[in-house]
Image (cartoon, rainbow, N blue to C red):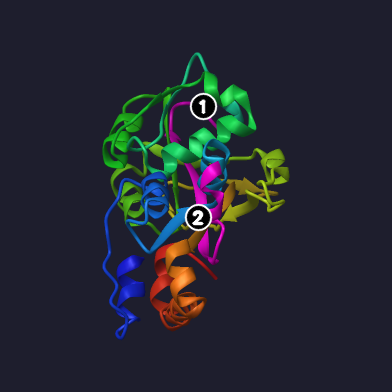
Amino acid sequence: FGQILQSHLPDFDVMLETTAGSEENLNNLVRNQVDAILVQSDILNSYLRKNPDAEDQLVGLQSTLYTEYVQLIVNEDGGIASVSDLEPNTHIVYVGPRGSGTHRAWEGFVLQDPRYGEFNTRFASYEEALSQVAGDANAVMLFVAGLNSELLKDADRQYGLQLSMVAVDEHYFSTAVDQFGNTIYEVATIPHETYPELQEGWLFGYFDSSVETLTVDAILILSKQWVDTYGSKPMTLFEDALWRSIDDIKPIVGEE
């Protein structure tokens, strides 16, 4: 995503920095080590709850760029139809690398429902987690990202007969709000056959592989230092670049 945005800012010197995920991005912004970051809305909420003194540096110019979907992958033979079927003493949850957006998203689940804190979680690359879930009926993998990810496209081809994508149907999460009254989660649907082999289902006698889930926003935040120096001009440039790159971005994040 960053590379696409960068390509549509030819007159703007953008240097991309790879990090472990949203929390590292937030730490870097607070320390004035970067000028702008991309972060999940749920992770921003939990970060501010843990670090209230950082509010002045993080609540400045923000813009929602796209939607990220909570995607739950399970073993085909595990008998799991939705996240509600998971049992703390039975199932292991892979939550991505330590400090990743998915890891912090799981911590956000724990904030909403302490039951999620009872699960055994494991850190691993998403590729390793997919391999583990394919071989263990009691293992599942959480993945928070835009739709049409290359990771799940590859999994669809490689593990389509061993893995399934199931519902994250915690509707009450959609009532959760952050410190400023903004909704953290939205109920949404992963469209029919986004990942044809991973999705399967029937609705009222008709084949429908859409999967109910929750979404969070991917938010661009500018540093307070940048805003104090340049005002809203950098955000205007970013938003203009976003609109110019929309055709390139749609296939990656699954936006309509």
Amino acid type for the residue under numbered disc 1: Gly
Q: Nearer the viewer, residue 222 or 31?
A: 31
Q: Is residue 212 above or below residue 222?
A: above
Q: Nearer the viewer, residue 138 or 240?
A: 240
**SS at badge 2:** helix
Residue farthest bottom in this picture: 11
Q: Position of residue 9 (x, y in %)?
A: 34, 81
Q: Is residue 157 left or right of residue 178?
A: left
> Which numbered marker is on residue 57?
2
Q: Residues within 10 Å of mark 1 (few under 14, many from 20)?
A: few
Residue placed under numbered mark 1 in the picture: 79
**Residue lying at 37% horizontally and 64% vertically, measured from the top left:** 35
In three-dimensional space, the C-alpha distance between marks 2 and 1, rounded to whole angstroms, equals: 46 Å
**SS at badge 1:** loop
Image quadrant holding the C terminus, namely bottom right
**Residue lying at 41% horizontally and 44% vertically, measured from the top left:** 23
Q: Position of residue 102 (x, y in %)?
A: 43, 42
Q: Is residue 31 magenta?
A: no
Q: Which residues are magenta?
A: 53-82
